[in-house]
Image (spheres, coloured by chain):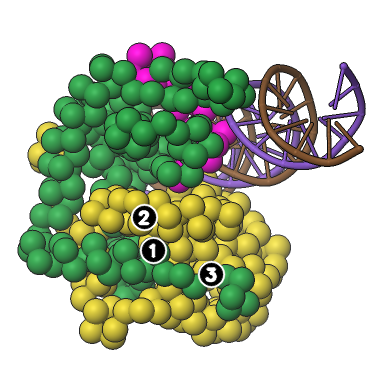
Chain colours: A green, B yellow, C brown, D purple
DNA sequence: CTCGGATCGTCTGGACTCGGATGATTGTGT
DNA sequence: ACACAATCATCCGAGTCCAGACGATCCGAG
């Protein structure tokens, strides 16, 4: 997630978006890069590796028991990549991997008390980061933006049906 | 650009976006993934490797003479990564690298006639792909979306000024 | 003219990602 | 009880990306 961006690109991305003001793809990329840079920055400041680390914590925070596989689907991270994230979080003692006694194949990652604290602290930093990215956008425009993005993202059409 | 996504993730991403309908970062990611999948699909169908390949062609299509370094900034691709893109395009004879006679360090990539044809053909496929991604969004909402994204992407605020 | 620093494109090393293979464990049919 | 397919986490290999190093070339100071 975050590691695909690098702060040195920020200016270039803005310039790029300015050069193609009508291209949806480019604007989306530039926008996601900008937001992610803010988030990664905030994450790094408080000891997290990535915004992705926080995303995993967020998914675990509701206390619901999830398989690693299920978790990987929820946070949209490849199951193999999730392993390294969980390893890191476990090393920081923000989560623990418990073995499901009813099926000893599966591991149930669970957030620890320290993890909960980290999540809570990051929440405010995260809001600030998003607010900074949304600087020049009014409240109702933000809501509209979320709606539109949601419609693009969750549209039911798939490649298979239209190819 | 495109290679960071994989079609198998499409459903998972949509599910993920649905799970966090108020999170800007996630929605942006999901949206950009969806659009990029379409574009990469269209690119692959006509012999291009990536949507990024097309982006490079687009930047060269205006005939303006550009250094590889300048070009890398315009299309937001790292200069070292751009090399492999140009190598590929040159192998397909869609571009040529000419040496600037006034400065023999610099190479001026230039689009060929075949490259121009490829660009023109891809333009329609690209429009179709974007239109498909923007299926349930009205015309004026599209314009608004582009404006908002543009404002996020090109905001003048930087990390340095706010840290 | 020449020397030193800056700038171009390219190469290299380390890190990351993901598809597919592997080992452990489960349930199911017989 | 036992073979066997299915499923979970993990590991491995191939591919990609980028920071930094490098050679080639340019330019300005002396």
At 58% from the left and 78% from the top, the residue drawn is A162
Quadrant of image for the C terminus of chain B: top left
Question: Is residue A90 on the magenta stretch?
Answer: yes
Give the mark nearer the N terminus: 1 vs 3: 1
Q: At 65% from the left edge and 59% from the top edge, which residue is drawn?
A: B88
Q: Position of residue B42 (x, y in %)?
A: 58, 73
Q: CA distance from mark 1 to mark 2?
A: 7 Å
- Would you say B9 lies left or right of B152 here? right
Q: Please tell me if label 1 and label 2 are on a single chain.
A: no
Tell me where residue B159 appears, x and y as whole percent. 18, 40
Badges 1 and 3, same chain: yes
User: Crowdedness of circle 1 by 10 Å Cα count: few (<14), some, many (20+)?
Assistant: many
* Residue for point 8% across, 61% down: A139
Query: Alpha-carbon neighbours of circle 2 within 10 Å: few (<14), some, or many (≥20)?
Result: many
Kindly identify which chain the residue marked by label 3 belongs to.
Answer: A
Closer to the camera in the image, A15 or A126: A126
Q: Is residue A88 above or below residue C20?
A: above
- The circle on residue B17 is 2
A106 vs A91, left or right, is right
């Amino acid at each position: 997630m975050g590691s695909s961006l690098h702060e040195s690109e920020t200016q270039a991305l803005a310039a790029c978006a300015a050069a193609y003001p009508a291209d949806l793809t480019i604007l989306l990329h530039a926008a996601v890069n900008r937001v992610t840079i803010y988030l990664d920055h905030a994450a790094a400041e408080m000891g997290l590796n990535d915004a992705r680390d926080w995303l995993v914590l967020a998914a675990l925070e509701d206390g619901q028991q999830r398989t690693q596989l299920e978790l990987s689907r929820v946070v949209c991270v490849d199951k193999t990549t999730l392993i390294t994230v969980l390893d890191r979080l476990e090393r920081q003692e923000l989560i623990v991997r418990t073995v499901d006694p009813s099926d000893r194949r599966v591991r149930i990652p669970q957030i620890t008390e320290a993890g909960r604290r980290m999540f809570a602290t990051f929440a405010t930093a995260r809001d600030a980061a998003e607010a900074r990215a949304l600087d020049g956008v009014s409240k109702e425009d933000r809501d509209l933006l979320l709606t539109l993005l949601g419609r693009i993202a969750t549209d039911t059409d798939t490649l298979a049906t239209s190819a």
